[in-house]
Image (spheres, rainbow, N blue to C red):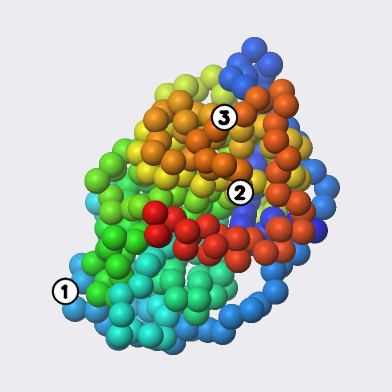
Amino acid sequence: MKRPLALLLPSVLFVVSLCMPSQLISAPPPTAPAGSRSLPPSFLTRPRLHPKPRGNPGELENPVGTAQVYSVTNPATGAKLYVQVFTPQDTDTKHPALILVPGGIGDGRALADDAARMANSGIIAVTFDPDGRGRSAGEEDYNGHRQQDGLAAVVSFAATLPDVNTQKIGIVTYSYGITMGSGALARHPDLPVKFLIDWEGPASRNYTTGNSAERGGRIRWRPCSDNAWWSERESVNFIGKIRRPYQRIQSEKDHVQTNNSHAVEMINAAIKGGLPWVRLNDYPPNQTYDLNSPPAMLPETMDRKLLQTVIRYARELFER
């Protein structure tokens, strides 16, 4: 069973592809498969609130639920971004941290439950609403440079939290969130980020624009011929520049695409770019793959354990 798309791609998914065959830069744009993902079981309890950190540039707001809420300014736009920090109960030691990037054009609400469970596993989890989404100010940028700069500001803010081990900060992206995550790391090489974990993110405009859904409206994507616009929004062009370990999570049946060629494209581009460590699922690191004969991906049963899989990979990468 696949996770419901609303979980990781809330509000809107993708529109019918505007790429004509002559404009394609890799595989033909796939279509959304039938089926949906089931939510993973809840296996951890909620974290507690933790006190306001000292000397923090983020503006602490009233706590909501089980997280502390902050306002962090995107320096590229001036927009105030809504940020939530989920902290483990043990505040006597510094903890590793994960910055969670939502899929589609969604916001942090889709990731709040997983963030709470991460916190109770001993990892500080940070969620946020990018510019123009959810409870943040600003305008939607479809994961372009402005929202990438906002993510960079959130990462920098997280590194100031007193409970965060600044040597162990990672980014986890979900679906189209890879565009924002890889773009932020490629364009801000000095961010204190140790690794990037990518769950089934589209590699290029062909995959990004290849599907449609009527869930909450429609995204009006630019034509694939608009190279200037898409130059900010194709993760396959960013991934080789991030200079950090890169872990790709890919199941046999993608949550949106009809094939998983985009996973192979991302791995091959990362290795070509000279990243220090690249791995697809649990295969040996630093190996490329043939698009015409891709390896077997994770079984569908693993989708029910996506959270546990993310935590497992994160713990391994924190110790690298």
Q: Measuring from the top left, give residue 59's x and y in whole percent.
A: 26, 72
Which image quarter is the C terminus in? bottom left
For mark 3, give the secondary structure.
loop
Residue pictured at 64% horizontal, 61% vertical: 306
Q: Residues within 10 Å of mark 1 (few under 14, many from 20)?
A: few
For mark 2, give the secondary structure.
loop
Residue most extreme to the left: 55
Residue most extreme to the front: 284
Q: CA distance from mark 3 to mark 2?
A: 14 Å
Mark 1 residue type: Gly
Residue pictured at 71% horizontal, 58% vertical: 302
Where residue 159 sits, quadrant-wise, is bottom left
What residue is shown with label 2? 282
Mark 3 residue type: Thr
What residue is shown with label 1? 55
Residue most extreme to the right: 34
**Residue 192, above or below 115:** above
